[in-house]
Image (cartoon, coloured by chain):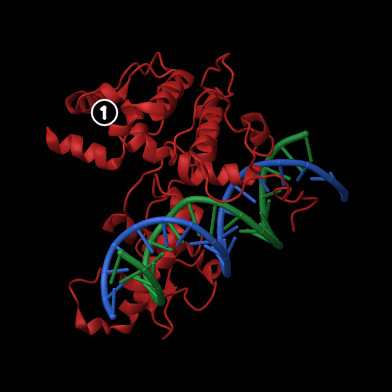
Chain colours: A red, B green, C blue
Amino acid sequence: MGRGRAPCCAKVGLNKGSWSLEEDMRLMVHIQKHGHGNWRALPKLAGLLRCGKSCRLRWTNYLRPDIKRGNFTKEEEETIVKLHELLGNKWSKIASCLPGRTDNEIKNVWNTHLKKRLVSAEQKPAATNDPEEPPLTSSSSSPHHGGNKSDELQHDPCLHTRDSSVVEVIEIPIDPTMDMSSFFDDALSNITSSSASTQLPDALVVPDGDFWSMIEDNSACNEGNTGAWLEYLERELELELDLREAAPNDLESLMRDGVGMEEDPVSCYFQQEPPLHPMQTFLTSEMVCETNHEV
DNA sequence: AATGCGACCAACCGCGAAGAT
DNA sequence: TATCTTCGCGGTTGGTCGCAT
């Protein structure tokens, strides 16, 4: 029980459901500039009619700049399966081993894909040796379906199947020092605060859609309100480069070499996560692939 | 073309745990 | 010790999309 816990969301006058583009922008700009020291106070400071919890979820599951977008690779899926064998339903721990993936996303993938796959793999006798089926090793014995037994396995180096046999667990190296939340806190604290107001200009009409699709929609960026919003965002984030005008070759060199990291605190912030180049925050994986393939 | 259905996934709720004050 | 706050989890919901009929 949360001791003295205040109820989440005073359920009066607060927005629920899907986030609008304006809300995304407000949250993103506010966090980029000021960080998220106090989630409860953040919505008010950012001018959002949301509860802090909702803001935190939106940020961690969707807006965070290091989130990897797109389908899970086979390697990632196998990693999830193996880590689930080790850790059980410790989605955040599993997520910490999969850079760019959120615990919610992993949970969804597990519940919708991997669990079913394991069940079907279990139903198929191992003797069939179906080459299409991923190995999944011991997972065919499905250590967890049938209940939340995750904690039982947490410190058990071996997995016990239902027929009492013991199977070997493949060890996945986990960096215990990896703490994404503190990583972001540290990174955000390095951003020099600007004197500009976080309030969005009232004159700007918020375009329809969501944040990333707006960013991703290359063609739509050049005209209308979307363009105005992007320009506003770039000003707020002090981004000097206009990606919309960058040619594919330019983008590739930007991805490779970076631009103005030393000068641009926001870029420095983005740069602190090694697998992600700062510019990737404004590029979809599709765009990056496209760029790489075209050259 | 319209409808139904299932899959997928973002988002929510309620709760316990843990850290900070 | 009590309180406040955030984090993390399990479970669930509701909207959207694609496919079959």
Is residue A275 visible to us here? no
* Percent coordinates x, y for residue A184 in the rendering: 51, 34
Identified by mark 1, the residue type is: Met
Q: Nearer the viewer, residue A72 or A63?
A: A63
Image point (46%, 38%), residue name: A64
Q: Is residue C5 above or below residue B14?
A: above
* Percent coordinates x, y for residue A181 in the rendering: 54, 39
Crowding around mark 1 (Cα neighbors within 10 Å: few <14, some 14 to 19, many 20+) is some
- Quarter of the image with the C terminus of chain A is top left
Q: Outermost residue, left direction?
A: A295
In the picture of the structure, the residue carrying the numbered disc 1 is A255
Image point (70%, 50%), residue name: A8
Element under disc 1: helix
- Quarter of the image with the N terminus of chain A is bottom right
Image point (69%, 35%), residue name: A41
Q: Is residue A261 above or below residue A110?
A: above
Is residue A285 visible to us here? yes
* Percent coordinates x, y for residue A93 in the rendering: 49, 53
